[in-house]
Amino acid sequence: MLGGMEEVTGLAAGVPYLVVPPFGTPSPDTPVVLAWHLLDAPRSETAFAAALPMRGLDAWRVYLGLPLSGRRGLSMNEVMNRSRMDVVANLYEPIAFGAVAEFPGAFGALRSEFGIGDGPLGLLGGSLGAAVAQLVLLEHEVNASAVVLVNPLIRLTDAIVAGGRAFGFDYAWTDAARATAARMDFVRRSAEYDAVGQPPVHIVVGKDDDDFRASAQDLYHALAHRYDDSTRCAITQIDGMGHALAEEPGIEPAPQTPHAAQVDEFVVAWFGDHLNSSDHPIRKD
């Protein structure tokens, strides 16, 4: 049970999911939030739902699993082997771009199965899941009404540098890898937010997330300078919070940490302010 509601898990077009229905009988314009997890803990759709349950939202809450992780995860040996051969081509690209490619089929299947309508749409992602949320926003016609990015991967190069430092290797960049990094450089792509209607974006980042915090700040400044209404773009830094949002191993649901609880409050507040259906307020305090 999540937030007193009965959650449903399964596969949609091969993609693992956890769905939490709205509080009452859904209508065609009931809002929906789509969420993608981290590769760090919580690293599955069910663990992400436990970390950020969004209990205060009267909305469909849909948590999607990423390729090669969670229920579809690789062994640590396989992860290391793939990383040594080419971490971009063998891990980041198939996970991120694979999630984007499988999104339309998975969401379409979920809408059909659960009767999810065309209500306001929110996108939520953590770390690499935040990159997926942005790729879906910029590359699919989803008409998102609000976005929350948590400890987001804003530049792929940040993850490569952090991984090289942690595991003691220097990555040999190829032209193909540089093209992948360009597609996953959201500061460089910040002008594309104009084309998708400048949806309200809230970036939530840990002050101790040293590998990703600077690029998160760069994206905030890039968007704040572009947006017609700068109040539709916000950044919050949480004292003492690093990159992970759950305790290891991070695959199964675990008790919510104090930092995750803080993040959850900001997520609920942002979506509560910006995902409004025509017949009732979304936020339930």
Image (cartoon, rainbow, N blue to C red):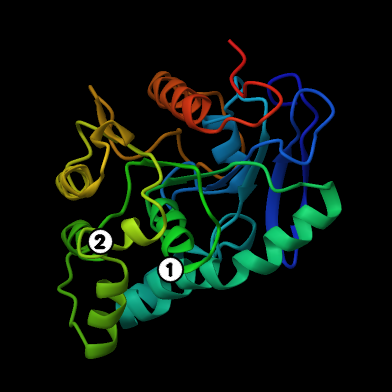
Q: Residues within 10 Å of mark 2 (few under 14, many from 20)?
A: some
Q: Which residue is mark 1?
A: 79
Report x, y in % for residue 197: 40, 52
Task: Decide which of tag 2 and tag 1 comes sooner along the chain.
Answer: 1
Report x, y in % for residue 169: 18, 70
**Number of disc labels:** 2
Q: Is residue 23 above or below residue 145?
A: above
Q: Quadrant of residue 213?
A: top left
Q: Which numbered disc covers residue 212?
A: none
The mark lying in front, picked from 2 and 1, is 2
Q: Quadrant of residue 8?
A: top right
| Residue drawn at 41 percent across, 24 percent down | 266
Real-space Cα separation, disc 2 to disc 1, in angstroms? 34 Å
- In the picture, measured across the screen, residue 221 lies left or right of residue 261, that is left
Residue type of the residue flagged with mark 2: Ala
| Residue drawn at 40 percent across, 76 percent down | 82
Query: In what quadrant of the picture does the C terminus appear?
Result: top right
Q: Residues within 10 Å of mark 1 (few under 14, many from 20)?
A: some
Q: Residue furthest bottom?
A: 175
Q: Which residue is mark 2?
A: 191
Report x, y in % for residue 45: 60, 46
- In the picture, measured across the screen, residue 279 lies left or right of residue 44, that is right
Report x, y in % for residue 188: 20, 64
- In the picture, measured across the screen, residue 29 lies left or right of residue 51, that is right
Residue type of the residue flagged with mark 1: Val
| Residue drawn at 38 percent across, 40 percent down | 200
Q: Residue furthest top?
A: 285
| Residue drawn at 50 percent across, 43 percent down | 145
Q: Is residue 213 above or below residue 139?
A: above
Query: In what quadrant of the picture does the N terminus appear?
Result: top right
Local SS, label 2: loop
